[in-house]
Image: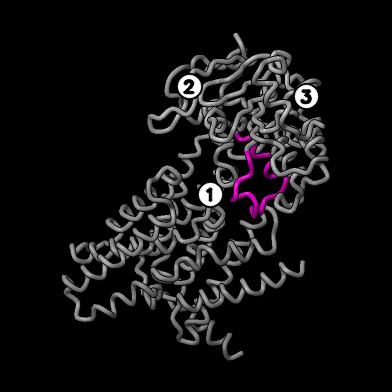
Amino acid sequence: MEIIQKLGEYMQYDFVQKALIVGVLIALCSSLLGVTLVLKRFSFIGDGLSHVAFGAMAVAGIAGLTNEMILVIPITVIAAIVLLATGKNAKIKGDASLAMLSVASLGIGYLLLNVFSSSGNVSGDVCTTLFGSTSILTLSDFDVKLCIAMSVIVILIFIFLYNRIFAVTFDETFTSATGIKASAYNLIIAVITAIIIVLAMNLVGSLLISALVIFPALSAMRVFKSFRKVVICSAAVSVVCSLTGILVSIIASTPVGSTIVAIDIAVFAIFALIGRKG
Amino acid sequence: MAQLSCKDVALGYEGKAVTEHLSFEVNKGDYLCIVGENGAGKSTLIKALLGLKSPMSGTIETGEGLKPTEIGYLPQQTQVQKDFPASVREIVLSGLLNKCGFNPFYSKKLKEFAALQMERMNISELSDRCYRELSGGQQQRVLLARALCATGKMLLLDEPVAGLDPKVTKEMYELIYRLNREDGITVIMVSHDIAAAVKYASHILHISHTPLFFGTKEDYIASDIGKTFADTKDGGAE
């Protein structure tokens, strides 16, 4: 009872409300895309792109941009297009190019931060970006509005292109053969993936984003056997885990990102057990 | 004008031709079997026929009211599909996507059409089952139903019996044969199984780096190349 009372108290704080809104929306979007990405064998895209975003953030910080997103979103989108949309035709294959881009941005980003940083606490800044630590609790009004706008766009795109995304994910060749522009849909998937990942960095940080993308989808796939049910279940799991994660982290003063991930893992374990029995 | 005609087509990758001087015609109601060794350019030819790859030279044209996007394709299984969570209905419906136009969802009419195709392939009772849990033969019938959703005119089948046991292979061949005979759907099938090709097909295209043979089945059996291959190979036709 004491906990519920304490929660009720926290809920009245502006920063908690913001964190919950942003957390739920990001969880929802990343899990929707997660199903497609996991099935396309792109589970690591979240990790790779978030490292690119980290590098871009370092550059933006050094350039003294007040709003980092202006630089970070375009760079990440370009990286996503290069990785997802060029796909099979690239000279360096999917997993290698992803790994290359990922570590390169991480390395260069950290190097730049160390060489040029004006802040006295470089490792603190880096840690915040990598693990998200408390940034979700210090969101500005602009961050929240940006997140709501982007999430609404992503959700609408997903609903309207749902059937096409399914077809392209299941069988790209067949879909192209029937005259659907599969490459265009791959491009759209790439762009919204990049946007979601940049937004999600606030929530869990660069290193843990993959968890938001893959765990809900994988959990849902243990139990459900149609694409629609997997998508719906994945979204539900993701939202519930993130909500619980944020609340737990506020009460227990644990880091937000890793708390959400820990809950995601626990839910995955439960679903895996259910799936084995069923 | 034939439904599909290739004139002196050369296919290849990065400027190197895999197959050259490919000329053949497919008329409505034909059953063409494309045979040839691995690496002879069969899969490249499929991509070209589907319009996914342009030929290095020569022309591929469709006629008799057949649009290039109206070729129903039955691909070989991909790795991704083996653990894909999708119901049979979802997969069959996806064949109708090009009939949706700007409508993001499937209309009631299209859903009924899909149900009809599932009935035709005798998989109606499987419609809520998960694709990855079906047997190989059932999976092929699902993909065939999807191809029929995309077209009523021409089917392009890529090794449709690969990995199936002899009994199911025979059923699959009979099913395709019926579609060709009773519904008048033109069939183009890529196959290793020359014995079955000779049994069911009306025409045969035997390709190597240059085409070795194109003509009717009867002529193929009588030809030197046909004799060599048809005698040495056994398949599901027996």
**Disc 1 marks which residue?**
A158
The location of residue B11, given as percent across then percent down, is 47, 26
Residue A276: which quarter of the image? Answer: bottom right
Magenta-colored segment: predominant secondary structure: helix
Looking at the image, is mark 3 or mark 2 earlier in the sequence? 2
Spatial separation of the CA atoms under disc 3 and disc 1: 48 Å
* Chain designation of label 2: B
Q: Nearer the viewer, residue B164 or A21?
A: B164
Numbered disc 2: secondary structure: strand
Q: Quadrant of residue B174?
A: top right
Residue annotated with mark 2: B20
Label placed on residue B199: 3
Where in the figure is residue A118, as x and y percent of width and height?
16, 74
Residue at image coords 45%, 45%: A88
Q: Which range of residues does the magenta coloring cover?
A: B76-97
Q: Amino acid at mark 1?
A: Phe
Q: Residue at x 30, y 62 (%)?
A: A104
Mark 1 secondary-structure assignment: helix
Q: Amino acid at mark 3?
A: Lys
Determine the image quadrant of residue B72: top right
The amino acid type found where label 2 is placed reads: Glu
Residue at the spot x=63%, y=32% of the render? B73
